[in-house]
């Protein structure tokens, strides 16, 4: 058995079934398990997928961008991480690129995206 086949076999146990197909331009709500000492809670992080990246199914990540008060925050989530409990798709916007990082520099009307209904 080759190394790549062995790695795929080990990774199959950790891939979570039932995850939707996530694309750039979707507005999602990610439910993440946060451990603080001996307590656990679920934190929701909601906004726009700015970038998707992966080499293999196990390495799939999404970058989510959100505005908190006056600051923009970007967070990278591994889609098949055991801390990710649920990903809800709220809306889909029309984009033509895999990465829409150019939206960082835009403000006001220029930063609007068209919603797909």
Image (spheres, grey):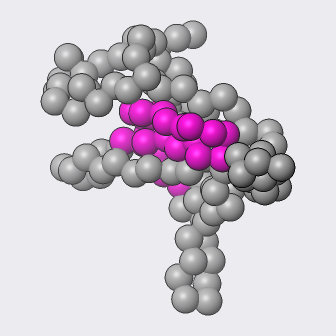
Q: Is residue 103 magenta?
A: no
Which of 76/94 is in front?
76
Identify the image quadrant of the C terminus: top right
How far across and how far down the image is residue 62, in percent? 49, 41
Residue at 46% of width from left, 18% of height from top? 93
How far across and how far down the image is residue 22, in percent? 59, 30
Tell me if 24 is positioned left or right of 117 in this view.
left
Residue 37, above or below 60: below
Residue 12, above or below 102: below
Query: In this rendering, does residue 8 appear at all?
Result: no
Residue 6, above or below 33: above
Classify residue 66 by image quadrant: top left
Tell me if 94 is positioned left or right of 69 in this view.
right
Which of 71/15 is in front?
15
Which of 52/12 is in front?
12
Judged by its main secondary structure, the magenta piece is: strand
Residue at 21% of width from left, 50% of height from top? 71
Tell me if 51 is positioned left or right of 35 in this view.
left
Query: In this rendering, does residue 25 appear at all?
Result: yes
Tell me if 114 is positioned left or right of 81 in this view.
left
Residue at 80% of width from left, 39% of height from top? 18
How far across and how far down the image is residue 112, in percent? 30, 18
Q: Which residues are magenta?
A: 44-65
How far across and how far down the image is residue 43, in percent? 54, 61
Classify residue 81 by image quadrant: bottom right
Spot the residue most to the bottom: 38
Residue at 47% of width from left, 26% of height from top? 24
């Amino acid at each position: 058995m080759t190394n790549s086949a062995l790695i795929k076999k080990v990774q199959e146990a950790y891939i979570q079934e039932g995850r939707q197909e996530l694309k750039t331009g979707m507005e999602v709500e990610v439910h993440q398990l946060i451990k603080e000492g001996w307590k656990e809670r679920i934190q929701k992080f909601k906004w726009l997928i700015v970038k998707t990246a992966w080499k293999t199914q196990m390495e799939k990540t999404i970058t989510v961008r959100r505005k908190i008060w006056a600051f923009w925050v970007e967070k990278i989530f591994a889609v098949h991480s055991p801390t990710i409990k649920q990903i809800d798709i709220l809306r889909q916007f029309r984009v033509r690129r895999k990465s829409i990082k150019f939206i960082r520099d835009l403000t006001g009307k220029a930063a609007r995206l068209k919603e797909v209904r």
